[in-house]
Amino acid sequence: MNPALSELGRIYPPERLLVQPGQLVPYESDALTAFRARPLAVVLPETTDEVVQTIGWCARHKVPYVARGSGTSLSGGSLPVEGGLVIGLNRMNKLLRLDPAERVAVVQPGFINLEVSNAAAPYGLYYAPDPSSQPVSTIGGNLAFNSGGAHCLKYGMTSNHVLGAKVVLPTGEIVELGSQSLEGVGPDWLGLFVGSEGLMGIAVEVTLRLLPKPEKYHTVLAAYDSLEKAGNAVAAVVASGLLPGAMEIMDHLAIEAAEAAVKAGYPMDARALLIVELEGEAPEVEAEARHLGDVIAASGAYEVRVARDADERAKIWKGRKAAFSAVGRLSPDYLVQDGVVPRSKLGQALLEIERLSQQYGLRVANVFHAGDGNLHPLILYDGKVKGQLEQAEALAGEILKLCVSLGGSITGEHGVGMEKKAYMPAMFSQADLALMRRIRRAVDPDELANRGKMFPHSEAPALTPHGPHPLEKAGVIWRE
Amino acid sequence: MNPALSELGRIYPPERLLVQPGQLVPYESDALTAFRARPLAVVLPETTDEVVQTIGWCARHKVPYVARGSGTSLSGGSLPVEGGLVIGLNRMNKLLRLDPAERVAVVQPGFINLEVSNAAAPYGLYYAPDPSSQPVSTIGGNLAFNSGGAHCLKYGMTSNHVLGAKVVLPTGEIVELGSQSLEGVGPDWLGLFVGSEGLMGIAVEVTLRLLPKPEKYHTVLAAYDSLEKAGNAVAAVVASGLLPGAMEIMDHLAIEAAEAAVKAGYPMDARALLIVELEGEAPEVEAEARHLGDVIAASGAYEVRVARDADERAKIWKGRKAAFSAVGRLSPDYLVQDGVVPRSKLGQALLEIERLSQQYGLRVANVFHAGDGNLHPLILYDGKVKGQLEQAEALAGEILKLCVSLGGSITGEHGVGMEKKAYMPAMFSQADLALMRRIRRAVDPDELANRGKMFPHSEAPALTPHGPHPLEKAGVIWRE
């Protein structure tokens, strides 16, 4: 073993320092399957001190690193760079504190999202951000990518639910960002860390805000004969002053897929389905439900169903949550895209996506967080047909450019990662990007933390073909 | 005139380049009256280009500068450094765009807070953050200090209502931070600017989020025979799941002062008054009002009044809003303090403040945004009694340390500015402060933008006695 890796061996016992090719395979990719890269090694720290020592090792040897939880990133955010280090945080998965009176939970970064709500349930509390990956994704990864979910319309994304974080900076220093009080001092330093995609350090303790579990839900499924009417219904609900917990739209293709997969009982002739869910204390929800009923009645829905109990509610959501994977039944392959448009531009965006779909001759299923203007077009293609993947990627790019041109964003919740860094200049000026880069370097002078992500002109060596690694050039890199 | 000032004279006509001592006097201080400093000059730009040219001039000559709106900062945030430049933005006061459909207003930094709501009123919209200074304070200053107000409980501070800002960086580059879409990319760069107290550049265009004006208000005034009961009532309202627009507490001394000043008709025998205001669509407010009635009835209030119309509502708020200035009737002088404690620690904090008040022999009136845990103790003293100001300041310091020890913050909405930078190490570690400083320098390498504020070991020359200015050392400084 080379001298540098031997040093790591003094921090970690062999079972937590993975160097054999077979051990590295699971860490070579994440949920964005288009990319692969072989790391130098994987370490599995169990304490903050081990994280600090590891960061120190990386700094001394100038080895880029990526912190990784469950690897569910859809933008390649948890990919290593070739020859870099993976810091797997799944063993730092303790619930450190749960205070029902203060309504906070303090967890380690490897703690699973859904487990926060499970731990809080006996006190009538829950953790609001609900990415679809919540049964497996970790809080550390949720922070890095500022994860959202269907129920983020009312209460916001991860950044709205993180009160504080203890962070190991790329310099090895430990800082405390944020506080439990509702009003902070100066700039939002914590907000600079949340969503920074691992470029500004590693959170080792995270303080989360818990909310009282809604006493009552009121879940409405409305069927429309056009996507446009469903989109306009969303605008009408917002204009009415109501703030639902979730507002989701599925188009015909998504309905078909979901129905085939889980038999949610959706109206199969609908061109678009709108799911609206109110949540809160019973008296308010009842008043809001009457109000919502009037708005939906006026919106041109040809069929409206209201869940009468928890089972009916679960069935409505089952279809929605299954929609992504269900699309796999309609097509051998698909790309999930993630873009945002101002809510008022939803109808225009959907029409344009339909036009692009026809132009490219590729089907696009639309499932989206309509209340946020967060689109998730699923682009269906067949990887076995030569050129179709490239066509699908080109179509995805056109959709992102459309989002930007409508005043929106290239990502709502999946992040930039590897996948979208080429689109950053479509959204940000050279001065914007230069500012971000200067701040990044102020935090991480050697740009080691999750090198190669987010910034278009990446400091990372090309993933393929394998470029020489600094340790390799120095003759110390480990090879089998 | 010296050569450096002559250069400024090529940017500004004489009426917008103030250099005479008499012209400079209004810019020597702000609403924190304890500090004064004489600037080199004051410029009054009317365009973004003039701001860029001015920043360039400052960078070339290494002259520190402060951007200033109406000078209402209570922490000395808009004070110049001795010999520095004041960039007065009151002439950049245009409403650039108001889009009722998108619910946004785009304004220049010198636009007055209350004028945003006035401009939006014909469309049934308003701008939510309502600092007491709102009839005079500017949006630029509100951004710099992330201003709050009584009605920020439900909808948050300025940072929650700013969607974007065009900023002239200290390097002279122009960047666009934030976006109109609800979900952004990467870290919260805009959040880094909002609340940065002028240290990271000058906003020249600000995009604000407008909200629909509440259809209905429900304003309750509850009287208690102890502060503790009022504090517990706040906790009970929050625990009930209700989210009022505002929840304010005044103690006996504040009640007495307000009543003497504006005859609000408050119950004079109360030891504490709680004001709770619900706001929103009529059906929901009515349902919530019944719910709130039950909570208040169970909270031990000995008298409960509900405003029956807009006049009664206005009367209740008139007393609350007059409380600060009304305290001037009870005492020749007073200090306004601004600290935050976790909401659950309110009762403990108030007991401790009472103990400190007795220990120092100085009366303390308490007026506060109870829902946020944001305390505004008013420390009464007589400046003509030798040593009393110092005692009052020492007491204020003890209250801030108390807030930090309870897990809160040294400022809720007034900012750090000059006044509180000495307390920063009580709240932040050396590593925390070093990180902030590195980021500040990444944005402003020469630390010219609002030099001397926020950071405890300030880069600014001492305000008094007058230290030599770089331009003076270079023999080019202007003197009368």
Image: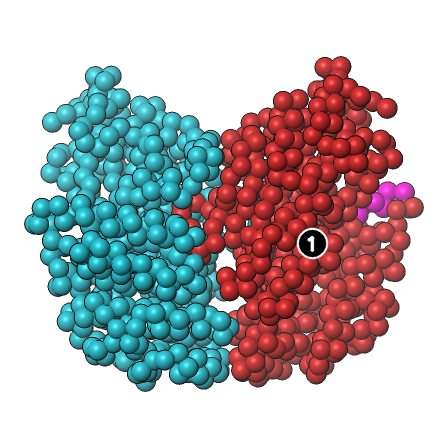
Chain colours: A red, B cyan
Residue at the image point whose x is 21% and y is 78% from the top? B269
Q: Which residues are the magenta region?
A: A386-393
| Image position of A216 (left or right of B207) | right
Front residue of A451/A170: it is A170
Q: Amino acid at mark 1?
A: Ile
Front residue of B416/B164: it is B416
Residue at the image point whose x is 25% and y is 21% from the top? B471
Query: Going by the picture, which residue comes out furthest to the right?
Result: A384
**Secondary-structure class at tag 1:** loop
Above or below, comparing residue A305 to residue A408 in the picture? below
Residue at the image point whose x is 74% and y is 54% from the top? A136
Q: Quadrant of the C terminus of chain B?
A: top left
Chain letter of the residue carrying label 1 = A
Is A388 colored magenta in this rendering? yes
Q: Residue A140 location, x and y as percent? A: 64, 47
Residue B53 found in image quarter: top left
